[in-house]
Image (cartoon, rainbow, N blue to C red):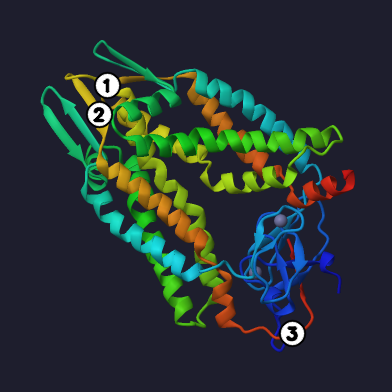
Amino acid sequence: MTAGTALVTGASAGVLACHTCGLTQRAAPEAHGLTCARCGSSLHFRKPDSISRAWALLIAAYVLIIPANLLPVMQTGSLFGSEKDTILSGVIYLWTSGSQPLAIILFIASIAIPAAKLLSLTFLLVSVQRRSLWAPRERTRLYRVVEAVGRWSMIDVYVAAMLTALVQFGSLMSIRAGSGAIAFGAVVVLTIFAAESFDPRLIWDRAEPAEPAEPANGEKQ
Amino acid sequence: MSSEALVVCHECDLLLREVPLEAGGLARCTRCGCNLYRHQPEGLERSLVFALTAVVLFVIANSFPIVSMNSRGLMSSTTLLGAVGVLLHDDMPSVALLVFVTTFLMPALEIGALIYLLLPLKLGRVPPAVPSVFRLLHAVQPWSMVEVFMLGLLVTISKLAAMASVVPGIALWSFVLLMFAVSAAVAGFDVRIFWARVGALR
Ligand SMILES: [Zn+2]
Ligand SMILES: [Zn+2]
């Protein structure tokens, strides 16, 4: 990108691409209720109510991440009494019992990723609302990472589910998934929806208002 | 300026002129750097082969126990659906639902939709309701989490190994292969070539 080259956006040229099949089509900028001519998906220049929907889902996730971390995700009952494990105590137990690699995997998936995801989305939403001009390329990349890593938080839910299914020996020993697992699963689902609601094009709308000119060329790799 | 030769970046909305790619190439947005499209001439064939393989693996993975454990005479084993059943029985319907949807239902729909779209196309026919099934495929993908489930199984087995002897079942190896088959099937699905073929047959 050289200085002085004006960039055209799809919105300013009245061209939009289908999010599902990628077909490029023309529409009036103020048009509503459009559907893709090829696959029938609904079309819009910007995701509708992107910011308020993302905020609503994000706030719900902030609320639920508290019980997700305080309530037990797993309860182990045995002849010697019962034991409740929260996400953090489970990670600490793994660390002290000699499985450091596992402890690190679980720490990243269950604690670091959800926290980083909430903070990154908050940052993206605030920066878009404040019409920030700062580092749009980096913010877009941050969004891409947030979208891609969220699913890995599900590990803890799967571990709780499989241990519950396998360790069922009545009073001798049994493991149950705890209510923390419900809250945690809800946080993962809510943040996936929140990331999906956010429209990364808003980062650029405010950063670089485009002027009508010739479209640029795609970059080969 | 024909709209056919233009692409719009879905992350920054930059309007770009389409550039032809060689096989295996990837076009990127010059402004935000995101991937715009790939060109995989043999992609659809590869995708179909891996999707058909995935069906076989999916059936095996769900018909046999994933792991068996043995601790001082106590034996236990479970399949994926067995685990969902235990969670339901254990008053954890939301966790049961989440596991069922992300590791069984969505992967099944994903594989099914790929075969539904690609097999008739290979035979030179366009199946009915292509747009709806294509949209379904797109909607299902973020929720199909076989690869995450695999890592979850790895952690589960390591945790169990501390207190019992754990024997991985045939279903575990099927899940590992299923993970690769599904990723390869999805990666090979070249959307642009797919629609070009649908258009040519209509
Ligand atoms: Zn479309
Ligand atoms: Zn872009």
Compare residues B58 and A47 and report the one nearer the observer. A47
Q: Residues within 10 Å of mark 1 (few under 14, many from 20)?
A: some
Q: Amino acid at mark 1?
A: Gln
- Determine which residue is flagged by label 2: A175
Measure how far apart labels 3 and 2 are at the Cα level: 63 Å
Marked residue nearer the N-terminal end (3 or 1): 1
Q: Position of residue B73 (x, y in %)?
A: 26, 10
**Chain assignment, label 3:** A
In the image, taking residue B83 as reference, residue B202 lies left or right, namely right
Q: Residues within 10 Å of mark 3 (few under 14, many from 20)?
A: few
- Determine which residue is flagged by label 3: A212
Disc 3 and disc 2 on one polypeptide chain: yes
Q: Are marks 3 and 1 in contact (CB under 8 Å)?
A: no
Determine the residue positioned at 39% across, 36% down.
Answer: A158
Q: Secondary structure at mark 2?
A: strand
Image quarter in which the N terminus of chain A is found: bottom right
Determine the residue positioned at 50% across, 57% down.
Answer: A147
- The relative height of residue B75 versus residue B131 in the rendered view (above or below) is above
In the image, taking residue B193 as reference, residue A207 lies left or right, namely left
In the image, taking residue A135 as reference, residue B191 lies left or right, namely right
Measure how far apart labels 3 and 1 are at the Cα level: 67 Å
Q: Secondary structure at mark 1?
A: strand
Q: Position of residue A179 (x, y in %)?
A: 26, 41
Which mark, by number, is residue A31?
Answer: none
Marked residue nearer the N-terminal end (3 or 2): 2
Q: Amino acid at mark 3?
A: Pro
Q: Quadrant of ligand 1?
A: bottom right
- Determine which residue is flagged by label 1: A168
- Write down the quadrant of residue A66 in the picture: bottom left
